[in-house]
Amino acid sequence: MGLTKIEHRKKIKMRVRKHIFGTPEKPRLSVFRSNRQIYVQAVDDLNGVTLASASSKEKEMAEKKKGTKKEQAVLVGELIARKLKEKGIETAVFDRNGYLFHGRVKELADAARKGGLKF
């Protein structure tokens, strides 16, 4: 019997997470995408703390929400980059969380890079 879609993603996630670790100076950007929304958190794994987060459900996004899911991902990427810049964080480690680096995940990462974050 094969793995379900969720089990397969978790297996990939664990394989990727073995090598990725976030620190206060260089947090892990963890992406989660549902069918309608996209979320990203900057996580300090050393202390087990979320430093900043952004999602397509935030108030700032409500005015700009009209658009495709990819366009929303771009706005979320820019928002997380801005929030981390305000906290003085320039670099991060990107955690695709078991998703393919394609589509909305790629758009979010590219927007965060354009916003000034270095991966």
Image (cartoon, grey):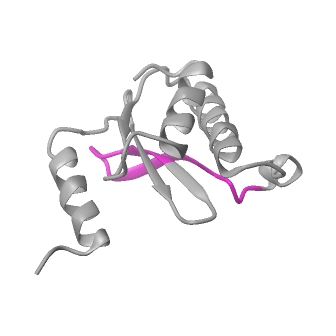
Write the residue at 65% across / 30% down: 82
Q: What x and y, as percent, mark residue 98? A: 31, 53
Examine the image and state in which quarter residue 25 appears.
top left
Write the residue at 40% across / 29% down: 92
Query: Is 99 left, or right, of 36 in this rendering?
Result: left
Query: How many marks do you count on the picture?
Result: 0
Write the residue at 49% across / 43% down: 105
Q: Main secondary structure of the magenta part?
A: strand
Specify the farthest residue to the bottom. 1
Question: In the rendered view, would you say 100 is above or below 110?
Answer: below
Locate the N terminus by quadrant.
bottom left
Closest to the observer, 20 or 8: 8
Residue extent of the magenta highlight: 41-58
Q: What x and y, as percent, mark residue 45? A: 30, 46
Asked whether the viewer can see residue 53, the reply is yes
Question: In the rendered view, would you say 89 is above or below 103?
Answer: above
Query: Is 25 left, or right, of 78 in this rendering?
Result: left
Asked whether the viewer can see residue 87, the reply is no
The magenta stretch spans residue 87: no
Specify the farthest residue to the left. 1
Examine the image and state in which quarter residue 36 appears.
bottom right
